[in-house]
Amino acid sequence: MNIYCVGTNHRTAPVEVREKLWFSSGELSAILDLLKQQNLKETVLVSTCNRTELYYSFKDELLSTDPLWQTLVQKKNAAEHLRAENFYSFSSLNAVKHIFAVASGIDSMVLGDVQILNQMKEAFTVAQENHSTGLLLNRLFNTAFHVGKRARTETEIGEGAVSVSYAAAELASKIFEDMTKRSALLIGAGETGELTAKHLTSRNLKNLVIANRTRMRAEELAQKLDGKVIDFEKIIDELLHVDIVISSVESPSHILNAKDIRSVMKHRGNKPLFIIDIGVPRNIEHSANDIDNVFLHDIDDLNHIIDTNLSRRKAEIPKIQEIILGELIQFKNWHDSLEVTPTIQQLRDQFETIRNDEVKKHLHHFSTDKHEEVEILTKRIVNKILHTPMVNLKNGSAEQSGTETQTRVHIIRHLFGLDKKDHK
């Protein structure tokens, strides 16, 4: 099977190495053009923050080339950072199995990653626009997309939060079902806080308020997320007006203590206050959780949720593997048919040529009114001779292993000289 894959990912290289081989969407066309000059018939390059993988087929499998990972490395001037041990390679059905695993999310750094499927589709689109794909890779990638869709619709591989920021937003959504009526205060505008705020706003949060020791950073984030900024010293006052508090700052001591929160709650009536403390050390005094209508969760609570969700996702892997196996068998059968179908047609053409030549030689022995009958009779004979072996060969390709099918095809081609005819 003329399908290959070479790549590097989170298992074979650390991020400081992987990032050296990251190709932007604008760079993909140029590298695909370069690869066309290296005896490659079809190519698709997938490049994300966690993997760069080249899927390809050769124009002529008999010709050898330098390892293709070297071409990728040279294109990025990254030879001093990447070595052979940073790369893996697959061929034939192993390459097909690998891309199915990637598309389904079970080969991702984050098990069940939902982004990889869209990233693969974008890479495939670029390759198609570059005229770098053909029969094999078109079928391969479309089948991979089908595998990814099945994985997400037939299993729960993508269910449940598996990151701190997403778990925080998910937990808030469970407390407040209708986020369009809720306001949130983000204390700290670092990476985790920003990601949490993005997840909240994606759920149609009504208002987002941001407080950060460096006000400029808070204003930059507020502009991104359509929020407003308050002074860091005003966060206690703001507790009167918000429903959700996300705190993620570096502080040697609590920035909110139980006494302050208890005082605020007296003025909030029975309105609940949901607090997620992502800080390490913790930003909120833990005893605040004992106050009526205050629901405080720290990073250990979130990690417990993440661990539970990861266990659930891992339990789905056997279902994914079953899907992959079924699709792998179907893909192999399709690929085997590529060799069976032309063989059947060539054999029919050869028999028809023989029949036609012999009829022409001997047709003068028959009266003109019998010519049509001779044509019909000889065609029926040929059809009857070919019917059983052709049916067995065609049906057998779906029931036998690829090796058995190829053996039968090769025997037939050898016996009837079809390969010799191809080289004339």
Image: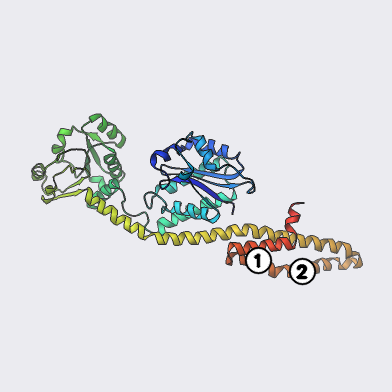
Distance between the alpha carbons at the discs numbered 1 and 2: 20 Å
Are the residues flagged by discs 1 and 2 in contact, CB closer than 8 Å? Answer: no
Residue 374 in the image: above or below residue 189: below
Quarter of the image for residue 192 reads top left
Closer to the observer: label 1 or label 2?
Answer: 1
Q: Nearer the viewer, residue 222 or 54?
A: 54
Left or right, 334 with reference to 419: left
Say whether residue 107 is left or right of residue 124: left
Residue 63, numbered circle: none
Q: Is residue 197 depicted above or below 144 in this figure?
A: above
Q: How is the image coloured?
A: rainbow
The x, y position of residue 224, in whole percent, is: 31, 35
Residue at the disc numbered 2: 380
Please provide percent x and percent y for residue 19. Answer: 42, 38
* Residue 52 visible in the picture: no
Q: Is residue 172 left or right of residue 239?
A: right
Q: Is residue 389 above or below residue 304?
A: below
Circle 2: element type: helix
In the image shown, does 170 or 306 lie closer to the viewer? 306
Sequence-wise, the earlier of marks 1 and 2 is 2
Front-most of residues 21 and 249: 21
Name the mark on residue 393.
Answer: 1
